[in-house]
Image (cartoon, rainbow, N blue to C red):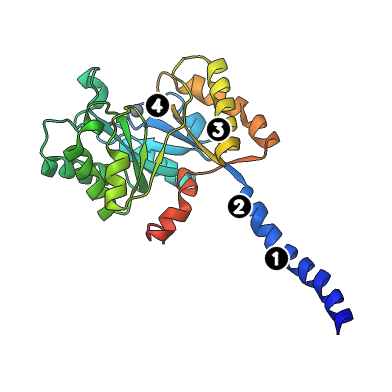
Amino acid sequence: MKKVNYLLVPCLLTFIFATTLPLHSEAKQLKAAIIIDDFGGCTGGAEEFLEGKIPITAAVMPFTPHSTQHAVWAHKNGFEVMIHLPMQPIKGKRSWLGPKPITVDLSPKEVKERVYEAINDVPYAVGINNHMGSLAVANENIVRAIVEVAKEKKLFIVDSATSPDSKFPAMTKELGVPIIKRDVFLDDILSTNHVRKQMEKLARVTELKGQGLAIGHVGIKGDVCSAGVWQSMDIFKKRNIKIVPVSELLSAELNKKNFLP
Ligand SMILES: [Zn+2]
């Protein structure tokens, strides 16, 4: 009998390794997402991204001349779409926010109406991230109203991290809405070299945490940002980091909360 057991053990081990190893390596796949903000109002770099092969996530500002067109274009070409919700900053020009931003003088009901309108203006959106907003994201009533709509419409939140006082983490936790925070801004300095450096940083963060999230822009920075992102693809290939739509970084949580079909 003992002999049989000796034979069985290696067989059993082989079986266990054979069944667990693929799962294990799948769990280890490093994933990075790149959200490109300001689609809709801005067109610089839009074509480079939306006709390209890098699976960026297109964050489209509502209420701008090309909002719906850019959302449809992105979706048609297989890109994930988000609503890039304009929110009041502490400093900055009102014109940077477009015609119907979320400002702190609005009532929660008015905030919700604007978010519903934004959802209509940006079809196919699966999540919301904030455009600017250092003042409004720190306002609990405003953020609660946004997150309540996100929950109702099954949209996740990406905190662009424009303020250390953002109420998005607390409100999403309270209401049970999936959230993820931006790790790296790609184009805070307008040079391709800088974008490449930031992409390196994204790769490092991803290796450290298993996943990473960067935000870049179309518009005046669009050509520089897209060039820097394209030129960095080799690094990601070499380091075996997969570029994925942002929802893939949240998929476990989205699944749990039935945000995925
Ligand atoms: Zn923006």
Which numbered mark, 3 or 4, is in the foreground of this view?
Answer: 3
- Quarter of the image for residue 132 reads top left
Residue pointed to by mark 2: 27
Query: Is 12 in front, or is 113?
Result: 12
Could you say which disc has been placed on residue 206 in the image? none
Q: Earlier in the sequence, mark 1 or mark 4?
A: 1
Q: Seen in the image, is 30 located left or right of residue 9?
A: left
C-alpha separation, residue under disc 2 versus residue under disc 4: 37 Å
Residue found farthest to the bottom:
1
- Quarter of the image for residue 89 reads top left
C-alpha separation, residue under disc 3 versus residue under disc 4: 29 Å
- Element at label 1: helix
Q: Residue at x 17, y 30 (%)?
A: 103
Could you say which disc has been placed on residue 19 in the image? 1
Q: Earlier in the sequence, mark 3 or mark 4?
A: 4
Could you say which disc has been placed on residue 205 in the image? 3
